[in-house]
Image (cartoon, grey):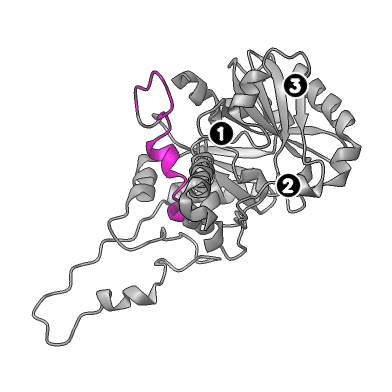
């Protein structure tokens, strides 16, 4: 995989080309000071000071177990250190606030490649839904998965020249409360040819998919042929789509082929074996016995695994290897 292939999957790179067939999104370049704030783990968990007290969250995330560390004991000769001023990004906050309003009052955030899917638990709704700058900052600051974008974006590149892109961007995507997870699909492209399609929510059997499989295949193929194939410049990649109730196809994301991108109902070895086939291999969960064990989170599924570097692929691979190792051990039959 080349560095330029990874770069093409950044949302600020592909979204302008696919704006008319994607989820409405507003993108802001982030100041370096905000990036350093996200990376800083040297002190307490501080949220930026809001320029507006409206809907503001507490500046410091309270942890009772740490409270003793921040108390000055009576009789101590040591002077308390002067606390550092809390972070503040007023210009960025104003831009984000205006964007949230223009997108209907609620958004979910994403950096160049990744979304803070692992920190949804910390939000009041248990999702990535945000209505204020403070909520966005909280999700970003609490996320470990964003370390991929910040420090390891090019780890899978053969011609890696840097550990991070020159600039970072915050993508604010319009929040839709009623997305149907069964209408999300991951498409696999090799040599600019659509070779595979997988249901994305692999932990559930949806009878409607079985009934409409052929129609969905034709719809997705037509969309790829007319809207994607000649526009996206890489030869090998994956892209995620959502099909609306009125059968409009929306691009959700682009990911590199392989690396940390999940193959879902395929394996990468299977995908490489079907490259010579003329027909597109379209896989769905076809009965309740075929569902896959999944990582249940409170995150809307459209951002569970849409960006490279999430780590879930390697996590599942390691877990599978450990399960096989245990099953082969003498104690397993005891």
The mark total stands at: 3
Q: Nearer the viewer, mark 2 or mark 1?
A: 2
- Asked which quadrant contains residue 46, the reply is bottom left
Residue holding disc 2 = 291
Where is residue 283? Give x, y as percent.
Answer: 76, 33
Sequence-wise first label, 2 or 1: 1
> Could you tell me which secondary element the residue under label 1 belongs to?
loop
State the image coordinates of residue 93 (x, y, percent, origin top left): 49, 51
Residue 254 spot, x, y in % from top left: 61, 30
Q: Secondary structure at mark 2?
A: loop
Q: Which residue is mark 1?
A: 261
**Most foreground residue, 186 or 153:** 186
Query: Which residue corresponds to the image point at 70% horizontal and 40% vertical from the top-left?
Result: 200
User: What's the magenta region?
Assistant: 141-162
- Residue on which disc 3 sits: 224
Residue 86 drawn at (x, y percent): 34, 60
């Amino acid at each position: 995989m080349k560095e330029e292939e990874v770069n093409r999957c950044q949302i600020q790179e592909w979204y302008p080309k696919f704006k008319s067939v994607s989820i409405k999104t507003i993108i802001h370049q982030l100041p370096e000071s905000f990036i350093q704030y996200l990376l800083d783990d040297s002190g307490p968990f501080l949220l930026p000071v809001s320029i507006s007290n409206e809907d503001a969250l507490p500046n410091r995330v309270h942890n009772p177990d740490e409270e003793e560390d921040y108390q000055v004991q009576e009789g101590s000769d040591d002077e308390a250190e002067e606390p550092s001023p809390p972070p503040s990004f007023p210009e960025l906050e104003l831009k984000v606030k205006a964007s949230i309003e223009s997108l209907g009052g609620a958004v979910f955030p994403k950096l160049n490649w990744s979304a803070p899917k692992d920190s949804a638990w910390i939000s009041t709704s248990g999702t990535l839904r945000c209505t204020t700058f403070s909520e966005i900052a909280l999700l970003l600051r609490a996320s470990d998965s964003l370390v991929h974008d910040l420090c390891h974006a090019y780890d899978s590149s053969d011609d890696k020249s840097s550990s991070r892109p020159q600039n970072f961007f915050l993508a604010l995507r319009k929040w839709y409360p009623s997305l149907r997870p069964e209408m999300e699909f991951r498409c696999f492209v090799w040599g600019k040819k659509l070779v595979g399609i997988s249901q994305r929510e692999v932990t559930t059997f949806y009878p409607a998919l079985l009934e409409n499989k052929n129609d969905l295949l034709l719809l997705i193929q037509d969309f790829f042929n007319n809207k994607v194939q000649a526009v996206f410049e890489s030869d090998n990649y994956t892209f995620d789509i959502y099909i609306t109730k009125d059968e409009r196809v929306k691009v959700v994301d682009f990911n590199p082929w392989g690396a940390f991108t999940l193959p879902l109902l395929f394996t990468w070895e299977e995908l490489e074996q079907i490259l010579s086939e003329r027909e597109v291999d379209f896989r769905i969960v076809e009965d309740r016995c075929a569902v896959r064990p999944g990582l249940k989170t409170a995150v809307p599924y459209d951002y569970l695994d849409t960006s490279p570097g999430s780590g879930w692929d390697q996590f599942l691979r390691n877990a599978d290897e450990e399960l096989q190792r245990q099953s082969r051990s003498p104690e397993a039959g005891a």
